[in-house]
Image: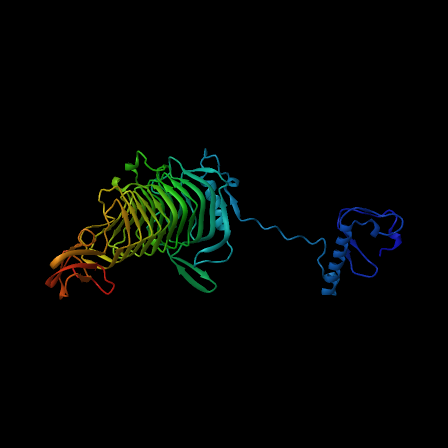
Amino acid sequence: MIKSEFAASLILWTVVHVVVFPKGPPMLAAAGRIDISGDGSIKNYYTQRQWAVDALARRRAAELVSSSTDVSSAPSPSSPLPSKSTPRIYHVTEYGADPTGKADSTEAIRKAVADACAATTDQWLIAGVNNLGGTEVHLDGGVYLVDAPITLPSGSGNIKIHGGSLRASDDFPTDRYLIELSASQNVSSQTNTTTTIGDVAASSSYNYEYVTLCGLLLDANYRGGGITVVDGLRTVIDDCYIVHFASEAVSVHSGHETLIRASFIGQHITAGADPGEKNFSGTGISLAGNDNIVTDVIIFSASVGILVSGQANILTGVHCYNKATGFGGTGIYLKLPGLTQTRITNCYLDYTGIVAEDPVQLLISSSFFLGDANVVLKSVNGLAKGVDIVDNMFAGGGSGIDIVALEGNFTDVDQVNVDRNTANGMTVRGTAARATVAGNGTRWEVDFSPVLLFPNRIGHVQYALQSDTAFCRHALRTVSGNAVVIESDVAVQGTVHVEVDQAPANGVIGV
């Protein structure tokens, strides 16, 4: 207890005091103002909350003393506080960018990006790429006019640009992109980066890693493109709306593992049935690299929705109604003959189809084709191997368009499986078929030409003869021009059930 001589008119103000007890360690007195009367009892004047705070402070002081016998080693109240760390979010408006879009903001945004990328952490991602710790360039919800590209310095990683709109000015160069992840203006270049980590020199062909572009509206003003990524690794383009491009909305060149998702892309802002659709040009997404993923993306106007010229890419949940096939448009164009390695699943091809040149290892499944949209296998060197076009739905206008069509002559075909597709108002084509023929005689012929995909190419036949009158000997006699002939040694009333396959799993089908 406090001795009575401290009573009378003692006032404790709303500051933190050090109170010395005769038998105990120093303690921090509770904050608050307390007037003490003449009986010397401080307890009677404490509120319940203040008394609890005092008890907690007394306990904490005892713990501090028991953990160190040298009280003088405790920090002095006058010791300076640690300096406040600087947030690593760079707001472009603080650099003078005009969020109204009236004045050019190119240099202001470039300065914000440069500062963000200069804030190194001495940590590394892939060799040569600095881990910027998740620093952000925030566009503050503005619309910014730019007359030149916003380019990230080479070696930048773990950085995000988000939260606003960029619009190209009338002076924007027509061969550039609004946002460029490119070490050089020449997007076809390949830059090798060498860095020293410790005493070891490491090299990488990647200039960027884990760069995120999200929540952006990019208006190219029919001048250039939206985003280009050159030699990037694990780039994320998410929740973007990219319009009015003249070349590509998104261009990926070389690099690895770019993820494009939940975005809307269109050269012209339309919702279909546009009177100017015949004149749509440009490409929505160009993938000239490997192992990229496009998911949940809608491409509503462009001559080509997605152009793929790199291997091992995945397209899923993509809706293309960019330009109808009847107007010369293509939803997805696979332009990498001989080494496709592309998977297209759960997509919606809306009046615009898929074209694949010399496909090798291609999967198209669980997708919906509307308005006579179909799949075209285009011969360059006559090659088609390891192709699965299965479990899709096709709907057309009744004009007899094949759901899968050939363009050119294919001479090297192996393991092509077109099967289990359904069609309404279009002609079903496949590599497997079955038929039943009934008759009275010694010869049954089944012509599969109207349904089989490849001409004069049956690799496997299985049949059964059901005789209603007598036992007989019978055999498969000829297979020619996708027609099958079965004969018996005596005339019978019977039914023949035949199944054929153009792509048996155990080998190449001869021409």
Q: Quadrant of the N terminus?
A: bottom right
Task: Say if residue 71 shows up in the picture.
Answer: yes
- Quarter holding the C terminus is bottom left
Q: Report if residue 178 is visible in the image.
A: no
Residue appearing at x 74%, y 56% in the figure = 56
* Rendered location of residue 434, percent (x, y): 22, 56
**Chosen colour scheme:** rainbow
* Residue 223, x across and y down, in percent: 35, 38
In the rendered structure, the answer to whether residue 477 lies left or right of residue 297 reads left
Q: Position of residue 169 (x, y in %)?
A: 40, 36
Image coordinates of residue 118 in percent, x first then y, are: 49, 50
Q: Quadrant of residue 72?
A: bottom right
Residue 56 as seen in the image, left or right of residue 99:
right
Quadrant hosting residue 388: bottom left
Left/right of residue 438 with respect to residue 66 in the rendered view? left
Circle count: 0
260, above or below 95, in the image: below
Q: Residue furthest front?
A: 469
Please tell me whether residue 326 is drawn above or below residue 443 in the rendered image. Answer: above
Q: Please state if 88 lies on the left or on the right of 293 as rendered.
A: right
Q: Which residue lies at the image location 50% right of the left edge and 58% below the top edge?
A: 123
35 or 422, nearer to the observer = 422
Most foreground residue, 509 or 3: 509
